[in-house]
Amino acid sequence: MHDLRLQILSLSQLCNGGTWQIELAHDRPHHMLFWFTRGQGRMLLDGGLRGLGPHNAVFVPADTLFAVEAGAQTLAQVVMIPQGTPLRLPDMPRQLRIRDAAVQSELSGILENAQREQSTGRPLAQDALEAHAALMSVWLRRQIALEDHIPAPRSAAQRLSGRFSQLVPRYYKTGQPMAFYAQELGVTPTHLTRAVKAATGKTAAEVLTQRVVHAARTLLGTTTHPARNVAQHLGFRSAAYFTRFMQQHTGQSPSQLRGAAKQPTNAAQGTALLRTR
């Protein structure tokens, strides 16, 4: 999704077209506020794996690597906020576990009012949405300021994994090997692999692979560009290697993943993705 408007989606709408859209590690070009109200799950964020439960608020800044593994009964709302907004938002990922029922109701109420504006399509609805988003920003910053929500100290492995997760969105299209990331971080590839594994449950290579697969599936599903163009965009040496890579990690070839039906708007959005490399 690359819509420049502020909007609110359900978690199921966010992964419409396949749960891979949120389960694979990736980043998005807009800020996101998740409000989980039911169910359990896990979230990869800031180089660590976190448990999710009811009344968890999670803020994910734009271009931040994340993934969500949600249980079948999980319910959540997601606020998509464009970059460049005048709203005062956190500059780092945050997870808040809200225990106060009144505070829970406050955010739920703001979201309900915002969704009502979004669904009615009245004049100035986007202005009203922005006003509700401003209230969400105030709510978020008030909670972050509380002593209960001061983040716990992170281990050395978690800090290194967090730095690695900042590099992935910048370099995943280049085809650079893991040695490149280790060199950028001043450690050996083996040490990097162990640290990321300890912090996330996945090796550094697995996290990087997920980001590439997510980008490939998105482009294959939203553009009509030949697979060789997608391969080149993502730093693959050849279309054949790209095909083997996708077959290995998804069980399907690029042509199978592409599917038959594509929305015109999605195709236009995907074309823009290729042009911004």
Image: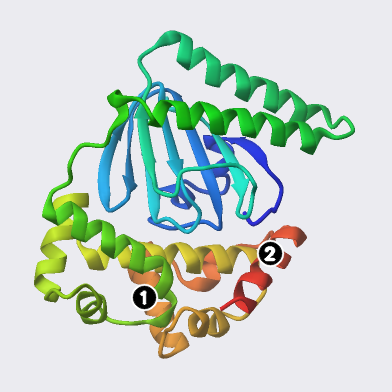
Secondary structure of residue under mark 2: helix
| Residue 132 against residue 18 in the figure, above or below | above
Secondary structure of residue under mark 1: helix
Outermost residue, right side: 123
Kindly identify which residue carries mark 2: 269
- Please name the amino acid that badge 2 sits on: Gln
> Reading the chain from its start, which is encountered first: label 1 or label 2?
1
Query: In the image, 178: left or right of 226?
Result: left
Q: Residue at x 22, y 72 (%)?
A: 185
Quarter of the N terminus within the rendering: bottom right
Outermost residue, top side: 102
Q: Quadrant of residue 41?
A: top left
Residue 100 appearing in the image: yes
Kindly identify which residue carries mark 1: 245
| Image coords of residue 175 (percent x, y) | 37, 82
In space, the residues marked 1 and 2 are separated at their CA atoms by 24 Å
| Residue 227 against residue 6 in the figure, above or below | below
- Of residues 174 and 15, the one nearer the viewer is 174
- Of residues 42 and 191, the one nearer the viewer is 191
| Image coords of residue 43 (percent x, y) | 34, 42
- Please name the amino acid that badge 1 sits on: Phe
Depth check, mark 1 against mark 2: the one in front is: 2
- Of residues 175 and 123, the one nearer the viewer is 123
Q: Quadrant of residue 134?
A: top right
